[in-house]
Image: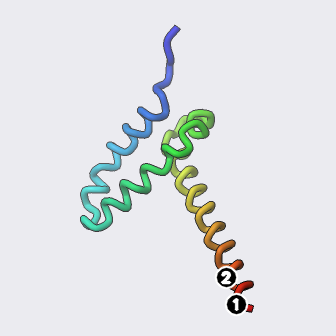
Protein backbone atom coordinates (compact mmCIF):
# COMPACT_ATOMS: atom_id res chain seq x y z
CA UNK A 1 0.00 0.00 0.00
CA UNK A 2 1.65 3.25 -1.14
CA UNK A 3 1.40 6.80 0.09
CA UNK A 4 -1.12 9.01 -1.65
CA UNK A 5 0.51 12.27 -0.60
CA UNK A 6 4.20 13.09 -0.76
CA UNK A 7 6.16 13.57 2.44
CA UNK A 8 6.14 17.10 3.75
CA UNK A 9 9.89 17.34 3.19
CA UNK A 10 9.29 16.90 -0.53
CA UNK A 11 6.37 19.32 -0.46
CA UNK A 12 8.56 21.89 1.29
CA UNK A 13 11.25 21.53 -1.38
CA UNK A 14 8.64 21.88 -4.12
CA UNK A 15 7.17 24.97 -2.48
CA UNK A 16 10.60 26.54 -2.11
CA UNK A 17 11.33 25.93 -5.80
CA UNK A 18 8.05 27.68 -6.69
CA UNK A 19 9.31 30.76 -4.82
CA UNK A 20 12.61 30.76 -6.73
CA UNK A 21 11.57 33.64 -9.02
CA UNK A 22 10.75 35.74 -5.96
CA UNK A 23 14.11 34.86 -4.41
CA UNK A 24 15.90 35.67 -7.65
CA UNK A 25 14.54 39.23 -7.56
CA UNK A 26 15.65 39.87 -3.99
CA UNK A 27 18.81 41.80 -3.30
CA UNK A 28 21.79 39.45 -3.11
CA UNK A 29 22.22 40.38 0.55
CA UNK A 30 18.61 39.28 1.27
CA UNK A 31 18.76 35.86 -0.41
CA UNK A 32 20.49 34.18 2.53
CA UNK A 33 17.79 35.57 4.84
CA UNK A 34 15.16 34.12 2.52
CA UNK A 35 16.91 30.73 2.53
CA UNK A 36 17.23 30.84 6.32
CA UNK A 37 13.52 31.64 6.61
CA UNK A 38 12.58 28.70 4.38
CA UNK A 39 14.79 26.41 6.49
CA UNK A 40 12.69 27.09 9.62
CA UNK A 41 9.81 24.71 8.73
CA UNK A 42 12.28 21.81 8.78
CA UNK A 43 12.44 22.33 12.56
CA UNK A 44 8.69 21.64 12.73
CA UNK A 45 8.42 18.99 9.99
CA UNK A 46 6.40 16.55 12.10
CA UNK A 47 3.90 19.27 13.04
CA UNK A 48 3.64 20.31 9.38
CA UNK A 49 3.05 16.70 8.35
CA UNK A 50 0.45 16.26 11.06
CA UNK A 51 -1.40 19.40 10.03
CA UNK A 52 -2.56 17.69 6.81
CA UNK A 53 -3.31 20.99 5.13
CA UNK A 54 -4.48 21.03 1.53
CA UNK A 55 -2.54 24.25 0.98
CA UNK A 56 1.07 23.34 1.69
CA UNK A 57 2.23 26.94 2.18
CA UNK A 58 -0.02 27.32 5.27
CA UNK A 59 1.99 25.03 7.59
CA UNK A 60 5.17 26.58 6.19
CA UNK A 61 3.99 30.09 7.05
CA UNK A 62 2.71 29.11 10.49
CA UNK A 63 6.04 27.38 11.26
CA UNK A 64 7.93 30.54 10.36
CA UNK A 65 5.53 32.72 12.37
CA UNK A 66 5.61 30.35 15.35
CA UNK A 67 9.41 30.23 15.35
CA UNK A 68 9.65 34.02 15.24
CA UNK A 69 7.05 34.29 18.02
CA UNK A 70 9.13 31.99 20.22
CA UNK A 71 12.25 34.05 19.50
CA UNK A 72 10.42 37.29 20.36
CA UNK A 73 9.16 35.85 23.64
CA UNK A 74 12.69 34.74 24.53
CA UNK A 75 14.05 38.22 23.75
CA UNK A 76 11.26 39.83 25.81
CA UNK A 77 12.13 37.55 28.72
CA UNK A 78 15.82 38.46 28.45
CA UNK A 79 14.95 42.17 28.39
CA UNK A 80 12.83 41.66 31.52
CA UNK A 81 15.76 39.99 33.28
CA UNK A 82 18.10 42.82 32.23
CA UNK A 83 15.65 45.43 33.55
CA UNK A 84 15.44 43.63 36.89
CA UNK A 85 19.22 43.58 37.16
CA UNK A 86 19.40 47.34 36.51
CA UNK A 87 16.86 48.20 39.19
Q: How many marks?
A: 2
The residue positioned 32% from the left and 43% from the top of the image is 17
Residue lying at the far front in this picture: please name it: 85
Residue 75: image tag: none
Q: Given the current orientation, which residue lies at the most extreme top position? A: 1
Classify mark 2: helix, strand or loop.
Answer: helix
| Extreme residue in the bottom direction | 87
Residue plotted at (32% across, 65% down)? 30
Q: Quadrant of residue 80?
A: bottom right
- Looking at the image, which is closer to me, 75 or 27? 75
Is residue 35 found left or right of 76 in the rendered image? Answer: left
Please state, as top left, top right, bottom left or bottom right, where the C terminus lies in the image: bottom right
User: Compared with residue 39, is residue 78 higher up or lower down, i.e. above or below?
Assistant: below
Q: Nearer the viewer, residue 43 or 54?
A: 43
Name the colour scheme.
Answer: rainbow
From the viewer's perspective, is 58 left or right of 73?
A: left
- In percent of width and height, residue 69 lies at 61, 62
Q: Is residue 49 left or right of residue 21?
A: right
Q: State the residue at coordinates (50%, 39%).
A: 56
Q: Nearer the viewer, residue 28 or 61?
A: 28
Q: Residues within 10 Å of mark 1 (few under 14, many from 20)?
A: few
> Residue 34: percent from the left, percent from the top?
37, 58
In the rendered image, residue 39, in percent from the top left (x then y), is placed at 43, 49
SS class, disc 1: helix
For label 1, the residue is 86
Q: Quadrant of residue 81?
A: bottom right
Say above or below: 53 vs 20: above
- Residue 82 is labelled as 2
Residue that appears at 38% across and 39% down: 13
Residue 79, image x, y percentages: 65, 79
Alpha carbons under labels 2 and 1: distance apart? 6 Å
- Do the residues under discs 2 and 1 have CB atoms within 8 angstroms? yes
Amino acid sequence: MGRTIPSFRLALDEEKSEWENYRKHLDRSERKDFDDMFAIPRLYISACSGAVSLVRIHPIFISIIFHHYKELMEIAQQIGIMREQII
